[in-house]
Image (tube, rainbow, N blue to C red):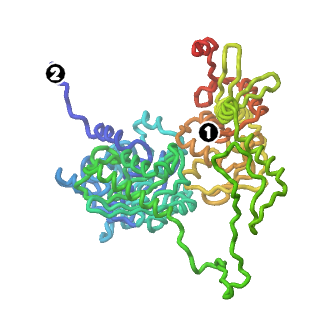
């Protein structure tokens, strides 16, 4: 039998490695920018076209490479970062395995120009699909510039699974955020189709956070710091009132490298315990500086998962640092003795003439053990004389109080029953019970029907929105006072991608400057006047959605907008409102389920009720 095991060719091996390292255009940018940081660059410029499908260009002013190093950099596992296995536990650079450039060159056309600062001429290299096309001397500026064209041109299956330009650009922005936050001493610029997305100067961490996520985040940042022999920890956490329901502003970094760490995330959430609802997530930007020998960063191809030697102790230190920061923020404000409008404290007069000693009025006939006996009809005034005037009113008042205090057992039960927020009024022949301001209960022939009022309203709004989006006939209701939206670049990009559909529905939203929008009107069928919160909630919901196909995108917008605009749990409905809600629900095409597939209606059969009552 012939031998069947053989070595893979370099091009196939590189494409397999690319499947782990290069997942989308954002992965290419991550690897090239990390190489630029390792080259001690102080300025990095990124240009992308069509969200990286057509072109990715990364330029830096780093050290550059010699002609030999420039060619060797594209060989698999060729690296200047490590020499032995022991070096894996002393890594201080972003890259070290030598897979990035080889993987990129195997699935794209790559051109590189590089020159060291002391050299007069540089090197130009062109590689396509792992095949060297050209290497020659060239005139270029100091540093390195990469051009990556036609990503996945030779792997059509991988290219087919790329998402829309909006989604891919969102991933690129996320990668830039992850690398720009810990390297705030480096200048970063990102341009998409020649339009600036980020232009970040070298600055401190707080300014870098504000410039990336918008001015609104500045007032929510609480600094934290801890310096021990195990870890130097610093950064910022967000105030509880600025927390959101989705992820987006949660960042851990260790030795300047972004990492995902669910264990440390739980430590953050525990520090916010009892001051934050369980479904809300605070913002945090936390930097760890540890001995490289105490961590292992080589457990995942993208190097975003890191194993710590002292995880439990770091958990405690992280939680303590956050609680200390929150405690400092919530302390009582200090007294300012220089403030205007100080309190005037009256000065006692020198003479005590005319000041009368206070007197005490008592009832000498009062007996606390004779509660059944009518109180005395007289009382002692300030001069010590008994006053028996208006005794009838005293008796009448006392009698009314006694009657109020005496309550029958049935009345007590009725009072407790009323506290359960159940409305049992009957209107137009229909019984609708409002239970806990969450469910509507109404009898039907087969038993008792329970309706979730929030999900029912979501279904009604969703079908209305889909009709409007299909017919493109939304009616706008102008706001008396337009509302301004300021947001970070990722949210701004997402809103720009759906603004056309929002305006079709009936919104009137216009760009008002960089990452700023103005809301002039809302759809006429929405009773909710807080347009800003509706848009923000819609964006938060869309962040976890998959906006791939236009029809699916519109459907997702309708789902998210219905969820943001629907009545909330705890909102009281009148009998008229409850009746209209039920009528509108059963006029829908699919009244049984919410737009996200959750149950709206549940019927408890009469047989089941009678069985439980036996």
Above or below for 156 versus 336:
above
Residue found at x 69% / y 61%: 362
- For label 1, the residue is 560
Labels 2 & 1 near each other (Cβ < 8 A): no
Above or below for 15 versus 345:
above
The image quarter containing residue 154 is top left
Residue found at x 55% / y 54%: 242
Mark 1 residue element: helix
Residue found at x 61% / y 11%: 607
- For label 2, the residue is 2
Left or right of residue 229: residue 340: right
In the foreground, 428 or 349: 349
Label for residue 95?
A: none
* Residue 3 shows up from this direction: yes
* Residue 421 shows up from this direction: no
Mark 2 residue element: loop
């Amino acid at each position: 039998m012939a031998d069947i095991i053989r070595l893979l060719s370099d091009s196939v091996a590189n494409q397999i490695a690319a499947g782990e390292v290069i997942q989308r255009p954002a992965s290419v940018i991550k690897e090239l920018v990390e190489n630029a940081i390792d080259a001690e660059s102080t300025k990095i410029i990124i240009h992308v076209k069509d969200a990286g499908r057509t072109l990715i260009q990364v330029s830096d002013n780093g050290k550059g490479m010699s002609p030999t190093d420039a060619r060797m950099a594209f060989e698999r596992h060729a690296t200047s970062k490590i020499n032995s296995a022991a070096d894996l536990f002393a890594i201080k650079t972003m890259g070290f395995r030598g897979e990035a450039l080889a993987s990129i060159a195997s699935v794209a056309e790559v051109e590189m120009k590089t020159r060291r600062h002391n050299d007069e001429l540089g090197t130009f290299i062109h590689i396509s699909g792992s095949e060297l096309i050209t290497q020659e001397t060239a005139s270029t500026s100091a540093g390195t510039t990469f051009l990556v064209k036609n990503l996945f041109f030779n792997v059509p299956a991988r290219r087919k699974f790329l998402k829309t330009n909006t989604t891919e650009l969102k991933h690129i922005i996320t990668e830039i955020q992850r690398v720009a936050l810990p390297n705030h001493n480096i200048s970063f610029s990102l341009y998409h189709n020649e339009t600036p997305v980020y232009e970040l100067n070298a600055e401190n961490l707080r300014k870098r956070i504000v410039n990336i996520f918008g001015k609104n985040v500045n007032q929510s940042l609480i600094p934290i710091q801890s310096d021990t022999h195990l870890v130097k920890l610093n950064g910022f956490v967000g105030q509880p009132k600025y927390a959101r329901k989705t992820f987006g502003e949660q960042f851990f970094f260790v030795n300047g490298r972004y990492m995902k760490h669910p264990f440390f995330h739980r430590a953050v959430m525990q520090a916010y315990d009892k001051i934050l609802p369980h479904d809300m997530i605070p913002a945090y930007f936390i930097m760890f500086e540890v001995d490289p020998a105490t961590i292992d960063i080589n457990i995942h191809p993208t190097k975003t998962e890191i194993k710590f030697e002292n995880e439990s102790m770091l958990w405690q230190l992280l939680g303590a640092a956050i609680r200390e920061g929150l405690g400092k923020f919530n302390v009582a404000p200090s007294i300012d003795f220089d403030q205007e409008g100080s309190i005037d404290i009256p000065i006692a007069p020198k003479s005590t003439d005319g000041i009368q000693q206070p007197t005490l009025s008592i009832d000498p006939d009062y007996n606390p053990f004779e509660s059944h006996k009518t109180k005395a009809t007289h009382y002692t005034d300030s001069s010590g004389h008994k006053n028996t005037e208006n005794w009838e009113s005293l008796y009448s008042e006392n009698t009314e109080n006694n009657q109020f205090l005496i309550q029958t057992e049935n009345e007590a039960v009725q009072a407790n029953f009323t506290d359960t927020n159940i409305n049992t009024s009957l209107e137009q022949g229909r019984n609708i019970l409002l239970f806990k301001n969450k469910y509507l209960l109404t009898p039907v022939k087969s038993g008792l029907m329970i309706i979730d009022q929030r999900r029912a309203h979501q279904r009604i709004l969703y079908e209305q929105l889909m009709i409007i989006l299909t017919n493109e006939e939304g009616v706008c209701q102008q706001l008396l006072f337009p509302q301004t939206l300021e947001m970070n670049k990722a949210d701004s990009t997402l809103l720009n991608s759906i603004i056309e559909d929002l305006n079709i529905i009936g919104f009137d939203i216009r760009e008002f400057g960089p990452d700023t929008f103005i809301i002039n009107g809302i759809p006429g069928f929405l009773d909710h006047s807080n347009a800003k919160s509706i848009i923000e909630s819609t964006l938060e919901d869309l962040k976890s959605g998959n906006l791939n196909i236009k029809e699916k995108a519109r459907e997702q917008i309708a789902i998210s907008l219905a969820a943001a605009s629907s009545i909330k749990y705890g909102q009281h409905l009148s009998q008229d409102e409850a009746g209209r809600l039920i009528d509108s629900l059963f006029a829908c095409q699919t009244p049984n389920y919410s737009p996200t597939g959750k149950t709206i209606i549940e019927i408890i059969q009469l047989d089941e009720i009678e069985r439980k009552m036996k």
